[in-house]
Image (spheres, coloured by chain):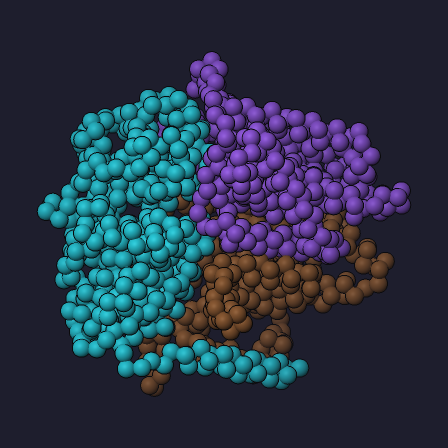
Amino acid sequence: MKINLNSKLFNAPIAIALLALPFIIDALFGHGWVRIADFALLYIMLALGLNIVVGYAGLLDLGYIAFFAVGAYTYALLGSPQFGLHWPMYVVLPLGALIACGFGVLLGAPTLKLRGDYLAIVTLGFGEIIRIFLNNLNAPVNITNGPQGISAIDPLQVGGFSFGGSHEWMGLRVDDVHLHYYLFLGFTLLVIFISRRLEDSRIGRAWVAIREDEVAASAMGINTRNIKLLAFAMGATFGGISGGLFAGFQGFVSPESFSLMESIMVLCMVVLGGMGNVGGVVLGGVLLVALPELFRHAAGPVQQALLGKVVVDPESLRMLMFGLALILVMLWRPAGLWPSTQRRREFNADDSVLQQEQETVYDASK
Amino acid sequence: MEIFFQQIINGLVQGSVYALVALGYTMVYGILGLINFAHGEVVMIGAMVALAALQALLAAAIAPVLAVLLSLMAAVAVCMALGYGIERIAYRPLRNAPRLAPLITAIGVSIVLQNLAMMIWGREYHSFTLPFTNDSHHLGGAVMNDVQIVIVIVALLIMAGLMWLVHHTRTGRAMRAVAENPAAATLMGVDINRVISVTFMLGSALAAIAGFMVSANYGIVHYYMGFMLGLKAFTAAVLGGIGNLRGAMVGGVLLGLIESLGAGYIGDLTGGFLGSHYQDVFAFFVLIAVLVFRPSGLLGEKLAERA
Amino acid sequence: MSMTRFALLAALVVAFAGCGKTETASTAASDELVIKIGAAGPLTGPQAHIGKDNEYGTRMAIDDANAKGVMIGGKKARFELLSEDDQTDPKTATIVAQKLVDARVNGVIGHLNSGTSIPASSIYFKNGIPQISPSATAVKFTAQGYNTAFRVMTNDAQQGKALGEFAVKVLGLKKIAVIDDRTAYGQGLADEFVKSAEANGAQIIAREYTTDKAVDFTAVLTSIKGKQPELLFFGGMDPQGVPMVKQLRSLGMKTQFMMGDGGYTPKLIDLAGAAVEGTYASLPGVPLDKMPNGRDFAKRYEERFKQPIQLYAPYCYDAVNVMIAAMQKAGSVEAAKYLPEIGKVELDGVTAKIAFDEKGDIKGGAVTLYQARQGKWQVVQTMGGASAAKP
């Protein structure tokens, strides 16, 4: 297998920009925004995982955050005073990914026959079931510590090097938010790389085939059952890794971090950015993490500048603007901000082709 | 035994509420094949408008019965306008877009409505009290009050009315035609846009009625009330077979019964291990079990799905 | 292609840099001492009304201090409030915490919930910024070994203990049913209540659960009805308390009803109407009426914000004053200098006489029990207090 390092994502200026980014952000806006960038990377990983299920294979999943939760709790339980276990990160992270993968198959198996919105509600239910169990398994035997959550989780560390502390190299002070940025960036690039390779692989094409027409795909000799399960499993694995990193980063997990609203946000990232296109999904992740924060900053000062006083409470306005942004962006670019070339072609096609393509898209996502 | 009877009544009342809201989901879905995620928020707006109107009318010394009716009508009118607006702005331009696009605009609409309501009516809870006494009736040891009786009856009446509308009127026939095959319906002279607008307005009117009754029953109104209710009702609609009116009714009542019996009995049956904290888990397990054996819900037919 | 994209990125960075500059330019100050107090709590979402109440309480303390003209280390101090919305979300809480740290706040009043206070506390601790929560009650909050975390509110163990003792010893109720809302607050308080009630000889005959989004409790209430308890305790907040007590009465149950501080709100009485009569609720501290400044605070709050105190505003007010007292004692507004003084502060607050134990919990932890009678919360009695032994 030849790895093409010259692909668009790996060119030098962008690499330098990515490496320098936390320091630029820090210098301009402070640590808070570096932390937001860290969360953006975690969400990008999540969105890329969901993209495999929704974007590639066309299976609408509204409970995706459950895998994030499984990864996070695996890390939390095996690396905190909860059970007195302090397993190293390089064991716990892969283990979390593996367990999440198992849950992915567990969810996929009974739902193979379901289509579209029926699948959506079952996955939604699955996500809620996981959250409810995490919230309640503090009695009769205390496993998850219930609604109180698990605190004092070990920081992400390899050997003696902790990402949770501050380090000084050659007079350059590097704080925990910066270190996490680089760690998460590494994982994100790995996930992007895997996603792109998958896209062009036999498996990736099989997913697209199922998305476009499941019956035809199966007639072409694709084992739809295994391929669908694989999509769930792969998506869940990425979610699990992201969850483990989240737990180590936050040092605290509680079930309220894994609500339905989170699943919906991740889905918005995928659809808004451009389903099936890695670049679009990354863009969606960055935007949806940054936008509410941007509105948080801007709502007050902008009113001040335009009207001379703060008329509407900035906090109320923030979510309102966010909702409006979701609507406007989708109206403006129904296929997402940066759709995959294939989808773009569908949209620029003449009417008869468009009609035909539409029908298959409807069909496949049902 | 009277405890069991009471649990059945609890489930019926809760289920009727779910059913009313589920009807709105299912009507839109039946015609457009679209989950109108903002429906729960329309219910909330209905409740808020009804409350505001009721307070204003009572303050103006209008007779209580008239005030209640007028405020209900105000809520219905506002919600119908809202439903029409939502469809025009957020869904119609996307009718030929990828299927998930309107789902995202629906989520956007839902966020906007919630925050608008928060800005207009404030962050706090409001009391919703009807200007009548709400008497309790004892039926064989179990208790049911006036509002609850009205909820069950209204749910049944509305359901019957809708069935009649869909199966015995011109508009209904047009709706069914659009659901079966929009292209063919157009050829037969059906104005698709009009039919879809009417559907949204009808669904939103039901949402207003549901919002009014839910608030009257629980006595409180809050800008956040629509989300959970919408979610439960959506689950109910899928359970019964989304797109099917009877299914919404059956699914709603069934979900209400599962919740009340599940919360009421499973805790004791499992020695407290699976108590009422797993109420939603039972509901979702039943849903998954039903869908595994009947992939399009209890009463869902393949025909109802859009080709 | 890639170069143009890079250029675009660079242009964006420059554009943002422009924005950043204008933002920081406005904070130039004169020779007065500017002290930034951060406040964090949910300003959107289901608990927004309580979060806003907290912000108001903090704001009032700051405005009072500015009006009074506080001198710190010989300089005139001017306080500024930076209020942030944590959306009751642990993740947003850490972002908000980091932002307050970036803004170089001198201290933080918050957060409202335990679920947000705990993850945020590690960030404040790392940066050495004192954090006084007005309302986080989870025992864990101050038990993490952070010297920056304080609270002016009793913790679940203190309050649950008082509630349990009151129910069993004072009211003499022995058959008790308990419901909690499965939030960190509700579950924590309910568990501590159960411990205390059982230790005092009561029997827990039913343990049921609901969620913080539910409005229909008829199923669990009916199930409890069959077991005929003398008291129903609910660990949760007023949005659930209102419909719960209404449904309790409409099911024809005469069981006594009791809640913790989450129930002691004007809303519970306004909204539940006649059904609420006889309900018990607790509130940490001494009744506002009994404290010299308390009544005045309540009056001024209502005049200024056109609403009654919702819940924790007085605690926020006290929390700010604790911070100011520590600053005055240290003669410095620098966190590192005045942090050690917070633990030694003794203040006649509007909620209680405030002093901290070595963990940062409030010492003694008086809890007052109220009963709803004739549409008003009336004091029944105060359990524990400054003189009482620590739990």
**Does residue A290 appear anywhere in the picture?**
no
**Position of A54 compared to C211: left or right?**
right
| Residue at the image position 52 percent from the left and 59 percent from the top | A319
In the picture, which quadrant includes the C terminus of chain B? top right
**Does residue C259 appear anywhere in the picture?**
yes
Q: Which chain is purple?
A: B
**Position of C177 compared to B301: left or right?**
left
Front-most of residues B269 and B157 = B157
| Vertical placement of residue B222 versus C63, above or below | above
Q: Which chain is cyan?
A: C
| Residue at the image position 53 percent from the left and 41 percent from the top | B56
Residue A340, position as x, y percentages in the image: 69, 66
Residue B126, position as x, y percentages in the image: 46, 42
In the picture, which quadrant includes the N terminus of chain B? top left
Q: Colour of chain A?
A: brown
Front-most of residues A8 and C90 = C90
